[in-house]
Structures are given as C-alpha cells and as structure tokens.
Image: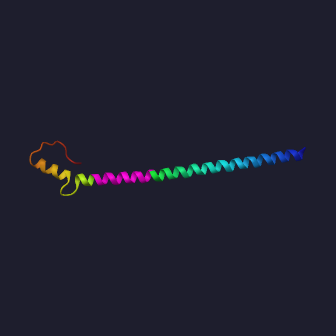
Amino acid sequence: MKLIESIWKLEKQNKNSAEIANLAGQMYDQIIKSINILDDSEKNLMKAVDNVTSAKKFIKDGRGSLYNKAEEMKKLGANSKKELN
C-alpha cells in the first residue's frame, strides 16, 4: 500500500512540475510581449517628440518662418495681446 501511495505521490509531483513549466513558459511569453510593446511605444513617443520639434522649428525658426512673418505684421500695426513665454 505504501508503494502505491509513493507512486501516486511521485506521479502528482511530475504532473505539478509539468504544470509549473507550462505556467513559467506562459509568463515568459507575456513578459517578452510586454517588453516589445513598451519598446514600440517608446519608439513612437520619440518619433512624436521629433515631429513636435520639427513643427516648432518650421513655425518659429528661420527667416521665412510663420512667427517671423507674424512679427513683421505686428511691427506694421497688427493688434496682438499675446507674447511668447
């Protein structure tokens, strides 16, 4: 009877080990997927920041910028209440 009990106990341990290995694999896959999503999000955020910087340069910097043209109009008498920070 003890022998049968030991065999069942060992079989249960083997089954639990297989389940643990399966769960560990699923956890690893979820970790990798999460890291990949975070990496993609970081790239997209950096691209968005680059786009904002480019748009600001286009609007504000350079001789032909929209800001410089608006400044010229202000000097010519355009009514304005706002100033750049």
- Horizontal placement of 10 versus 22: left or right? right
From the viewer's side, name the closer residue of 6 and 65. 65
The structure residue drawn at horizontal position 21% and vertical position 57%, both measured from the top left corner, is: 62
Q: Position of residue 52 (x, y in %)?
A: 32, 51
Magenta span = 41-55
* Labels in figure, total: 0
What's the coloring here? rainbow
* Left or right of residue 14, residue 83 in this image: left
Residue name at image x 20 percent, y 54 percent: 65
Identify the main secondary structure in magenta: helix
Residue at the limit of the structure toward the bottom, as seen here: 62
In the picture, the quarter occupied by the N terminus is: top right
Give x and y (percent) for residue 36.
Answer: 51, 52
Whether 48 is among the magenta residues is yes
**Magenta stretch containing residue 2, yes or no?**
no
Q: Residue at x 52, y 49 (%)?
A: 34
The spot of residue 12 in percent (x, y) is 78, 45
Is 32 on the left or on the right of 85, as rendered? right
